Amino acid sequence: MVRADMVLDVICVHSYIGYTRLVRAANRLRARGTEVTITFRPYEIAPAASDSPQLLMPVLERALGPYAATQTELFTWQAARDGLELRYDLAVATGTFRPHLLVALAAGQGRAEAVVERLFRAHFTEGEHIAAEDVLRDVAEECGVDLAPYGPGVLARTSPEAEELRGELHRLRHHGVTGAPVFRIADGPVLLGVQAEGVLYEAMAQAAARSAGATTP
């Protein structure tokens, strides 16, 4: 078995591209019969952002000025090379604490990969407000995550699950995580920023080979 860790934020285009490449690399190895487990770690690129929705482009224009259009065109082109569609004309700026909370809950049910992909697509392609509770519950239902056992307030910022998430965010900051994406395959080196699919695949294949060697009598 190979373990892969990824630090991401679901409103980060680099995380979206990095996630896509990581899962494709993992699926190539899975097709060869190797179990690959991916753990997603939370990062907020805009920790002070409100959950109140705003159109993303005006937010970027205030932050980047005339460079906003150039940057989004570049990101759109880069993502398209990986088969991803970015719709900055639809995208909604929002905080991501509550989406990260759903990812953590989904991980406990083995559904995190599906939920992360669905949140990325909802934000970047469909213009959904991914911090809205109705959207999060729709994503959970679509991806087979059962929220009922946690009670009606599970997606609130005051829930016990939310306190656990705050602890994880704090732990990662304490360990020096200052951006996303970040990858670590098994006990290999930390990989900062978007990585080529081939790099991620090779790191996982080598980890699988080491694991097989360690278990050979």
Image: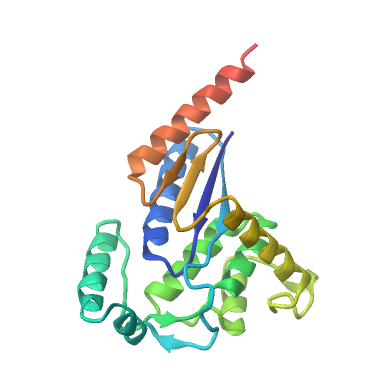
Expressed as whole percent of the image width and height from the top left, the position of residue 110 reads 64, 54
Residue 195 locus on image (x, y percent): 36, 46
Q: Is residue 133 shown left or right of residue 70?
A: right
- Between 95 and 206, the residue placed more toward the observer is 95
Residue 101: x and y in percent read 64, 68
| The N terminus sits in image quarter | top right
Residue at 40% x, 53% y is 18
Query: Residue pushed farthest top?
Result: 217
Taking the spot 32% from the left edge, 85% from the top edge, the residue there is 62
Of residue 26 and residue 183, the one placed in the foreground of this image is 183
The quadrant of the rendering that contains the C terminus is: top right
Q: Name the side, left or right, on which 184 lies relative to 73.
A: right
Q: Nearer the viewer, residue 163 or 129?
A: 163
- Colour convention: rainbow
Q: Is residue 91 above or below residue 117?
A: below
The count of marks equals 0
**Residue 20 pos. (x, y %):** 40, 54
Image-based side of 75 in relation to 118, left or right:
left
Residue at 60% across / 64% down in the picture?
103
